[in-house]
Amino acid sequence: MMDIHEILKKLPHRYPFLLVDRVLEIETGKRIKALKNVTINEPFFVGHFPHRPVMPGVLIIEAMAQAAGLLAFEAMGAGTDDKSVIYFAGIDSARFKRPVEPGDQLIMDVSIERQKAGIYKFKGVTRVDGQVACEADFMCTVRTVG
């Protein structure tokens, strides 16, 4: 388990772009289960959509990727610093099954499918109240920057 203070030590993201509130389970090098509480005061709801607020699908995938980043950093025994970043390298098979709205709690299950030379392939599924909201396969890479 990881609370917000530990997450902030491991991920470089900050408000309004930090999309993981808590890690519920982590199996180092294998899988992570994390959550995001979706609230009406999220900045993207102002324009997406004013008459019917829905969390943008790309942000649901970003939330899964942030959970994946926590899993990757944990597997490497590292955390964020000014020299390490994790980037998307690809997104495949993304499917959106239900809208995510204010008041929902996103539960993200992400597993490492493969890892080689700093490139990770993940499979992710997000659920709200046990129903699949989004699923995707994606690749991320950890890079050292100047």
Image (spheres, rainbow, N blue to C red):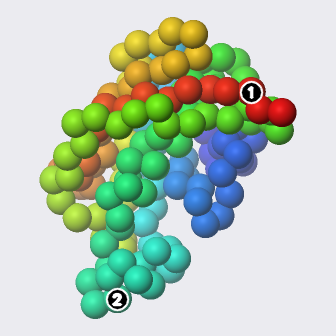
Q: Residue at x 41, y 13 (%)?
A: 114
Answer with the quarter of the image where residue 93 lies: top left
Q: Earlier in the sequence, mark 1 or mark 2?
A: 2
Q: Which mark is residue 50?
A: 2
Residue that protrudes farthest toward the front in the picture: 146
Q: Which mark is residue 103?
A: none
Q: Residue at x 77, y 32 (%)?
A: 145
Instruction: Give the camera-side residue of 140 and 132.
Output: 140
Contact (CB < 8 A) between labels 1 and 2?
A: no
Q: Residue at x 52, y 19 (%)?
A: 119
Q: Which mark is residue 144?
A: 1
Tell me the element at label 1.
strand
Please tell me whether residue 56 is drawn above or below residue 81 in the rendered image.
Answer: below
Tell me the element at label 2.
loop
Is residue 27 visible in the rendered image? The answer is: no
Q: Residue at x 68, y 35 (%)?
A: 85
Is residue 64 visible in the rendered image? The answer is: yes
Residue 5 x/y as whole percent = 72, 48
Residue 25 x/y as whole percent = 47, 32
In the rendered view, does 19 fall on the left or right side of 33?
right
In the rendered view, does 77 fall on the left or right side of 33?
right
Answer with the quarter of the image where residue 73 lies: top right
Distance between the Cα atoms at labels 1 and 2?
Answer: 40 Å
Instruction: Give the camera-side residue of 46 and 41.
Output: 46
Q: Number of numbered discs present?
A: 2
Q: Nearer the viewer's eye, disc 1 or disc 2?
A: 1
Mark 2 residue crowding within 10 angstroms, few (<14) / some (14–19) / many (20+): few
The quarter of the picture where the N terminus appears is: top right
Q: Amino acid under label 2?
A: Pro
Q: Amino acid under label 1?
A: Thr
